[in-house]
Amino acid sequence: MLFKVMQSRNQKRLHRKKRVRAKVFGTQLRPRLTVFRSLKAVYAQLIDDENGKTLCQFNSAMIKGKKNNLLSAEKVGTELAKIAVSQGIKQVVFDRSGYRYLGKIKALAEGARKGGLDF
């Protein structure tokens, strides 16, 4: 008898993340913009996978006021883009970490585009 293994939502997301990460790779000239959502905050960072270094990061816990809504996610994208542009980074590869492109993830991406990043 075959039994279907029940997977949680997070297990499915991690499986999608692993599949996408096999194809998405950040370089010094075009780092990877990766996103993580928790119940309390939204985190974003730029990673150079060739050297294994985080170039810059920003999260919604650094913002005063409400920390986990669409406005704070957009602010995270905008602030991260400001930091990246000041370091001379204009192009990135977007890694949404298995999350669907809507809500906070979309707001963060649009904020990063407003801030001057191209992806």
Image (cartoon, rainbow, N blue to C red):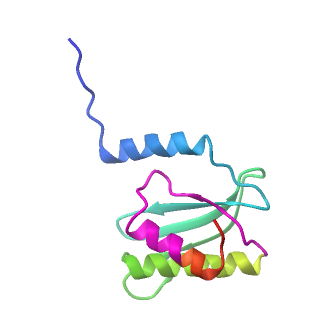
From the viewer's perspective, is 39 left or right of 31? left
Q: Residue furthest bottom?
A: 64
What residue is drawn where x is 46% and y is 43%? Answer: 16
Q: Can residue 38 be seen in this snapshot?
A: yes
Viewer-proximal residue, 113 or 42? 113
Residue 30 locus on image (x, y percent): 74, 61
User: In which quadrant of the rendered view does residue 93 lie?
Assistant: bottom right
Q: Nearer the viewer, residue 90 or 76?
A: 90
Q: Is residue 22 left or right of residue 89?
A: left
For the image, the number of numbered tags is 0
Q: Residue at x 52, y 70 (%)?
A: 109
Classify 26 as above or below 108: above
Q: Is residue 42 above or below residue 97?
A: below
- Coordinates of residue 64 in the picture (x, y in percent): 45, 88
Considering every residue shown, the one lying at the far left of the view is 1
Q: Quadrant of the N terminus?
A: top left
Seen at 61% across and 40% down, the residue is 22
Residue at image coords 66%, 82% = 82
Of the 4 image quadrants, the one containing the C terminus is: bottom right
Quadrant of the image occupied by residue 83: bottom right
Task: Evaluate whether residue 67 shows in this view.
Answer: no
Q: Is residue 54 above or below residue 2?
A: below
Q: Which residues are magenta?
A: 88-110
Return the x and y of residue 15 as percentages of the image width and height: 44, 40
For residue 109: magenta? Answer: yes
